[in-house]
Amino acid sequence: MKSARLERVVTRGSGCPRYGSFPDLGGYAGRIAIALGVLTAAIMVMSTIHPWGDLRAAAPSTVLLDGTAIPPNVRQVLEAKCADCHSENTHWPAYSRVAPASWLIERDVHDARSHLNLSQWQHYSAEDQATLLNRIAAEVRSGQMPVKRYLVLHPQARLSAGEQQLIYDWAKAERKQIRKQLAAQPATPATNGSTTP
Ligand code: HEC
């Protein structure tokens, strides 16, 4: 008696024809599949939108700080730790192509380049170069750059105390050099477009 009742319960539970073969589960699975499909399609469409323009169109390998006598070790630090945002030599990881992450990253790169683009250094006026060198020194010394959110995914980009000092000293020396040149030729008007690119 006891075992017969148990058998009935087990049979019902595992898909007795009277109850159909789990129609609810099939519905959920189908709806989840549709939702995932819609989500994937939406992400694919969103990823084609670039609110800050096509930043990837820039030349993949530009010379940083063209026109300056920058020591190789300073160049190396700037290339490794600043160039992703402050130049046109940005490395775009796979996740940077998927919205909405792509928008956050592109906004950073757009902002960073509009403040300081090391690939366009030769196109800044001497005045602007001097100002930017001052800001580089200040940002590096105060530990503001590279920005924190970048360091979360690129911990190796953090500047060591030695590197901070290296960039600070170079920026100050380079600025002094430019100031000296400016003082030596006070009559030269800014003819080569003194606006920042
Ligand atoms: C994740 C991208 C990113 C990296 C990497 C990065 N920066 Fe920046 N940087 C920005 C953004 C965005 C701004 C503008 C907004 C702000 O100040 O936060 C900026 C602003 C600056 C400014 C200010 C320019 C001005 O006009 O005031 C300087 C100088 C600067 N960065 C230097 C550096 C240096 C030097 C490094 C490398 C050690 C570096 N940054 C690395 C994103 C970055």
Image (cartoon, rainbow, N blue to C red):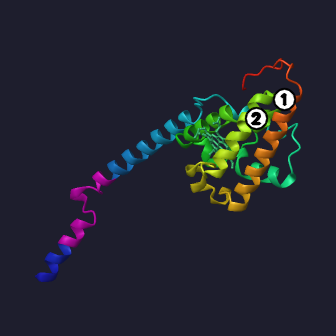
Disc number for residue 182: 1
Quarter of the image where the N terminus is located = bottom left
Q: Residue at x 24, y 63 (%)?
A: 16
C-beta proximity under 8 Å, tags 2 and 1: yes
Segment tinted magenta in the rendering:
9-25
Ligand 1 found in image quarter: top right
Callout 1 amino acid: Leu
Q: Earlier in the sequence, mark 2 or mark 1?
A: 2
Q: Position of residue 115 (x, y in %)?
A: 66, 34
- Residue displayed at 66% across by 50% down: 140
Please tell me whether mark 2 sits on a helix, a strand or a loop. Answer: helix
Q: Residue at x 76, y 22 (%)?
A: 194
> Residue 50 versus residue 66: which sits nearer the camera?
66
In the rendered image, residue 13 lying in the magenta stretch gets the answer: yes
- Membership of 17 in magenta stretch: yes
Residue 61 visible to an observer of this rendering:
no
Q: Please identify the dominant SS of the magenta region.
A: helix
Q: Amino acid at mark 2?
A: Ala
Mark carried by residue 130: 2
In the drawing, does residue 32 fall left or right of residue 168?
A: left
